[in-house]
Amino acid sequence: MTLPTAVRRSSALERAAFGKNTRKTHPRTTLGNWQPASQRPDPVSILLEQEATRVPELLPIRHSRMAVNPFTFFRGTAAIMAYDLGTYPNSGLVSQLCGDAHLSNFGIFGSPDRAMIFDINDFDETYPGAFEWDVARTVASFYIAAKDNQFTELDAQTAALTAAASYRTAMSQYASMNDLDQWYSRVDAAFLLDLAKSEGGARAEKSMNQTLNKARTRDRWSAINKLTEVVDGTRQFLNQPPLLARLPMAGDQWDVIHALFEEYRDTLLNDRRELLRRYQVIDFAHKVVGVGSVGLRAFVVLLQGRDADDVLVLQVKEAVQSALAPYDSDAEAQDDGHRVVTGQRLMQAASDVFLGWITGSAGRHFYVRQLRDMKWSPEISALTPQAMRGYAQICGKTLARGHARSGDSIAIAAYLGTSDTFDQSLLRFAQRYSVQVNEDYEAFTRAIADGTLTTASSEDDALQKRFTLESHASAQVYRDRDAQAAQATP
């Protein structure tokens, strides 16, 4: 798929008419009628195919993290949902997508001007596609997470509807802006504080202030203190395999690392190249990250500037083909590190100054960023129904801003309209998809129980057996409960 060019050649009225006419070929209710394809592949087979090129020794960690509950499973199944949406009729209204827009992939971080902003923070799967694919994944994630938190059906529906309605109303606001104002718009600390106060009063505003202050403490030194130690006067990474494994460098290996570092630096803007030129690599380690990303090659690089107190940690993460690419008939081979960087720069209001890409010596693609720069995301399991509604409102608005930067906001806003038709359709999708997720989760835990998939070693075999049995039982509970809820909803 390609990003729209109609924005440049059509008037606002023509773009709005195009968006509204799209309802005839793809009614807004269509997504709510989603059903799994009759020839839908086994979900475990999709995961196994995705894992074929990953580090096999790390896959048990991935499976363990996914197996905690249906929501953590959902976090790792971007490839499965890509199949479900990519093989289903779509609106054809294309924007740059996050590709994995679940609620845990949003958060607070520091912008280059040191302001605190809220934005999408994971772009491994970014790709052009129908805008509603991202919205569907976001809305479904709120419904599934709410059910996992043991919220009532009404509270789960409210969280999902809030995310959809927030996206729709925000897209209408962006469509009314001139292009520069739209481009410079961002969800900043002032917006977060105002929203907290309007939704929860002074107490919520105070809590949001505490959250922002906590995020500010998660700066580069918090990562340095957590991941490194000083040995014989030299700072180096800790060695805590398999999650953090220091990689000893000897002989010409340092030459290879420095050559790759120079290649990476050339992908930065000129002023940032000059900044990075003042640092040199002093240590290197492998670090396991995320849930769905586990098994991809990911490294951390320790750099030092003018002295021992001027240090920086960069993350180098493998980029593979987007889960959405197989459903693009025009897809061409590309550098996936470059793809991630381009998508992130396009969708984020302000991106990391050290964001760049590199091709490894074995031809693998990677992107590079700061490991931590005042980053914070909420603990989803700790959210109350009220907090989740507020979070859904922020995420919906943020996703709309990202799509407005790359897609045709006027056409999308006209397609969405002013009624809650789209919101209700996305809620029905979330309910139906929650049933599917729980069925897939049950298949996943069966695969663990029968040994098809391995998990990280437990303290003893009894604990591992109890873990898989409890996961299997949990899956059945979720499946039965959500199936009943979906049947009860018109």
Image (tube, grey):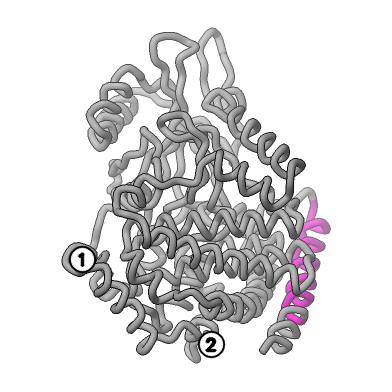
Q: Where's the C terminus, which quadrant?
A: bottom right
172 relative to 262, above or below: below
Question: In this picture, which residue range is highlighted in magenta?
Answer: 460-480
Which residue of the protein is positioned furthest toward the left in this rendering?
Answer: 9
Q: Quadrant of residue 53?
A: bottom left
Q: Is residue 291 magenta?
A: no
- Which element type, helix, strand or loop, lies under badge 1? loop
Residue 53 in view, yes or no: no
Q: In the rendering, at what x and y percent does residue 85 appear?
A: 45, 76
Most foreground residue, 66 or 348: 348
Q: Where's the N terminus, which quadrant?
A: bottom left
Using residue 223 as the reference point, say whether residue 344 is left or right of it: left
Q: In the rendering, at what x and y percent does residue 138 appear?
A: 54, 64
- Which element type, helix, strand or loop, lies under badge 2? helix
Q: Are marks 1 and 2 in contact (CB under 8 Å)?
A: no
Using residue 311 as the reference point, say whether residue 92 is left or right of it: left
35 relative to 332, above or below: below
Would you name the residue on which mark 2 appears?
33
Q: In the rendering, at what x and y percent does residue 276 appear?
A: 32, 24
Would you name the residue on which mark 1 appears?
5
Q: What residue is shown at x 33% (from left), y 28% (from top)?
A: 253
Amino acid at pointer 1: Thr
